[in-house]
Image (cartoon, grey):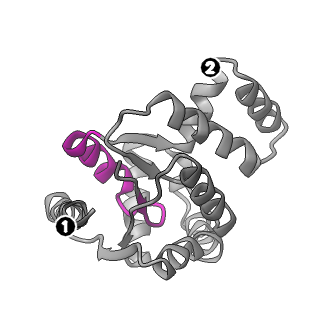
Amino acid sequence: MYNLILFGPPGSGKGTQSEKLISQYGFKHLSTGDLLRGEIARKTSLGLEAKSLMDKGQLVPDAVVIGMIQNALETYPDVPGFLFDGFPRTSAQAKALDQLLASHNTSINMLIALHVPDDELITRMQKRAKTSGRIDDADESVLRKRLDVYRRDTMPVAAHYHALGKSLSIEGVGTIEDIFGQITSIIDQKQATH
């Protein structure tokens, strides 16, 4: 099993690249948003707990999200690997994920970070606001705050995996195919030595 975290700030192209990686390698995509929606739709105990918190405008605790990932690991034991997108977002979540994966005799093999300059991220997100209807992507001051939160809270996740020798950063600017080629080259090289 090969487990990958595709990492980067909002607008870095994670969603676009995730789709291509799933198609290429058969990874099971684990997006915390999708997991939450799935658990809520199935009315599981975790889903009901998450919905209750979300309805009150509260964040879903790490333990609930980890529980959902645990369910996914048990539901899909035969996939070639998992692609984590949007999780972990904090060092505490990274450590909890590492412990969970270890209990299933697996681990994160690689975190690939997409590096994109802030001005390019803002341009991309504002374009996305026009085409996808994501209103939260239209206001530049809101976007800059999101990037500040990303740097403060989420960037330490990359440092966590870098300290474990499991992190690489690539330029997330260029054609979709060029960026995809860089990512697949890293995965293929790591899988060959795995």
37 left or right, relative to 126: right
Q: Nearer the viewer, mark 1 or mark 2?
A: 1
Q: Give the x, y percent position of residue 74.
A: 53, 32
Q: Residue at x 34, y 58 (%)?
A: 13
Q: Amino acid at mark 1?
A: Gln
- Ranked by sequence position, the earlier of labels 1 and 2 is 2
Measured in 3D between alpha carbons, the distance from the residue under mark 1 to the one under mark 2, in whole angstroms, is 39 Å
Circle on res. 145 = none
Q: Total of numbered circles in the picture?
A: 2
176 left or right, relative to 44: left
Front position in the image: 181 or 54: 181
Circle on res. 41 = 2
On the image, which quarter does residue 60 sit in?
A: top right
Above or below — where is 52 with respect to 64?
above
117 left or right, relative to 50: left
Above or below — where is 102 with respect to 165?
above
Q: Residue at x 66, y 58 (%)?
A: 96
Q: Residue at x 63, y 17 (%)?
A: 42
Q: Give the x, y percent position of residue 54.
A: 76, 37
Q: Mark 1: which secondary structure?
A: helix
Which residues lie in the magenta part? 5-26
Circle 1 residue: 189
On the image, which quarter does residue 19 sit in?
A: top left
Q: Amino acid at mark 2?
A: Ala
53 left or right, relative to 176: right
CA neighbours of label 2 inside 10 A, class few (<14), some (14 to 19), many (20+): few
